[in-house]
Amino acid sequence: MDTFIQYLTEQIDAGKAEIARLEEDGCRDDADFAKVRTNIYEVCRTVTNALANRPGAGPEAIKKQFENFRTIWGAALANAGKHDDARSIVIEEAKLKALADVTAHFPEAAK
Amino acid sequence: MTQENALKIFKSLADTSRLRIVQSLTKGEMYTELLAERLGITPSTVSFHMKKLEDAGLVISRKEQYYTVYSLNRDVLESSLFDVAAAAPEQIDEQQKREAEYRQKVIDSFFEYGKLKAIPVQRKKKLICYEVIAESFTPGKVYTEQELNDIIAQIHEDYCTIRRDMIGEGILRRDGSEYVRMK
């Protein structure tokens, strides 16, 4: 699990660097979207840290929580698309993309 | 052009990604996916930026089969920076402007995609929300209770409270089992 948490920390650090670069480049909206993406790695790290060693929790509970996120954000994306809400579409897509990356790295780390 | 329009133009161009989009469009019309590929961003991000550019009147769009094709609005882009900077503010009463901004803030907080998220506790906010709901009814048209409930239920599940409140506030008038929008 330490490798997985290390991966999330690396993504958070990379995200922060990207935010700084975008802000410096004058891409304020893109920087905001990068903040959303980075925040997802932070949320996932918090969830992992909280559930990894909790009695009765562990990897399965973490996976379940990630799946909950996917369901909620997937529904939010569908809703935003239905209402042609351009800003929310980008935000929900960014969240789901970051989550997909997190879950793709989860199984091997959880072994 | 008003100062509000000028502000929208400056705000939308004060972003490198949008400036790059405008720069790409100087070469000709383009559609979302092509712009996304050229600029290395997602199509949804391009659409988001396009909406801002369109709101500022800098870009115009048209549908072509499955694609939305964007081009520059030369009328606006060819106006001189002097003219844009010299745009006068719209003649709106300051008090009216503040009230309109407050009203919009309440609507943005309590409504999402046409649904009322919660009935406000504060009367002033509640009235604003009920006025928005009232827009679903044609003034002067007579509605049965069922028709009225169906319309309100699409906006918020507690249609009974809303219906009662709207009558109490004089937004709706009840005549037996018939209802008419008053305001």
Image (tube, helix red, strand yellow):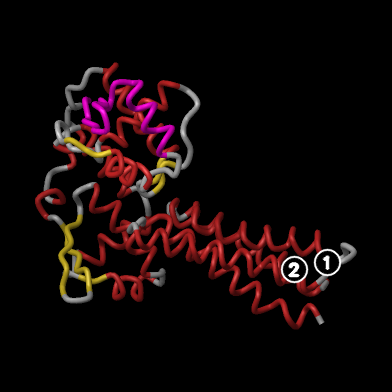
Which amino acid lies under the numbered mark 1 shown in the image of this protein? Ala
In terms of sequence position, does the residue under pointer 2 or pointer 1 come before the other? 1
Q: Residue at x 83, y 70 (%)?
A: A58
Please state the chain letter of the residue tagged with numbered disc 2 in the rendered image.
A
Q: Residue at x 40, y 55 (%)?
A: A87
Q: Is residue A63 magenta?
A: no
Query: Callout 1: residue from which chain?
Result: A
> The N terminus of chain A is located in which quarter?
bottom right
Q: Residue furthest front?
A: B176
Where is residue A53 drawn, in percent x and y? 88, 65
Q: Are marks 2 and 1 in contact (CB under 8 Å)?
A: yes
In this view, A55 is above or below B118: below
Farthest-out residue, left? B75
Q: Which residues are magenta?
A: B159-183
Q: Nearer the viewer, residue A100 or B42?
A: A100
- Give the side of residue A45 with respect to residue A25, left or right: right
Q: Which residue is mark 1?
A: A57
Residue A37 shown left or right of residue B161 in the figure: right
Residue B6, picture quadrant:
top left
| Crowd class of label 2 (few under 14; some 14 to 19; many from 20; radius 10 Å) | many
- Residue beneath label 2, please? A62
